[in-house]
Image: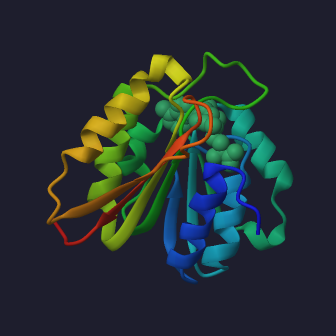
Amino acid sequence: MIVTKITDIAKLFWKEHINDRDIVLDATLGNGNDSLFLSKLVGSKGKVYSMDIQKKALDMTREKMDSSMSNINLILDSHENLDKYIKEKLSLVVFNLGYLPGENNEITTKSKSTLIALEKSMMLLKKGGIVSVAAYRGHDNGEEYIEVFKFLSTLDPKKYKVSLVNPINQSERAPRLFLCQKMKED
Ligand code: SAM
């Protein structure tokens, strides 16, 4: 296997971590690739919630879905409202921050709503559950990355273990991957 992107590394973790029947959230649906990947991992008895603020993202994903992917629940809303739609405990929440590739790059994730969504995600995580965040330092003058870093790095280590995957011979702007695992219930 050749690992070219931080999102390839993220997928390795998801694959190792996710079981059949799990319930997961893709908090930044985009062109749907992550949700389609997750749909296969959780299987027909599992569930994938997929959120985006752009109808285009939902339409593009719907076009790619086949009959085996009816476990994907598409939600047109900001991830900061995730608790309106999700009541179950989650095994994994995925954030791939930034904008929809090839579309308007002004419609992008913003640190304020991202942090609200992160906090709410962590409340819904089951014990052992993981939040995976790919953050781009080139985006928003790095502000969103810095805010996510500050938030995750100050979490109580008895409750959450947080790691950062950092490509060291690539552009300063290359995305980094945060992995945050819940160690015990609140
Ligand atoms: N996960 C995607 C994939 O599989 O390719 C890529 C995600 S793309 C980098 C980021 C997406 O986040 C965009 O589609 C954008 O519309 C969406 N987004 C921006 N702000 C959002 C918000 N507040 N809530 C949910 N989605 C948001």
Q: How is the image coloured?
A: rainbow
Quadrant position of the C terminus in the picture? bottom left
Q: Quadrant of residue 106?
A: top right
- Percent across and percent down for residue 159 are 18, 64
Quadrant position of the N terminus in the picture? bottom right
- Percent across and percent down for residue 130 are 40, 64
Q: Is residue 13 above or below residue 111?
A: below
Q: Quadrant of residue 66?
A: bottom right
* Residue 173 appears anywhere in the view: yes
Which residue: 54% across, 44% down?
A: 168
Q: Is residue 79 left or right of residue 28?
A: left
* Residue 18 appears anywhere in the view: no
Which residue: 81% across, 59% down?
A: 65
Which residue: 36% across, 50% down?
A: 83
- Percent across and percent down for residue 38 are 64, 66
Q: Is residue 57 left or right of residue 94?
A: right
Q: Quadrant of residue 100?
A: top right
- Asked whether 96 or 179 is in front, the reply is 179
- Percent across and percent down for residue 72 are 65, 62
Which residue: 60% across, 76% down?
A: 42
The total of numbered circles placed on residues is: 0
Q: Quadrant of ligand 1?
A: top right
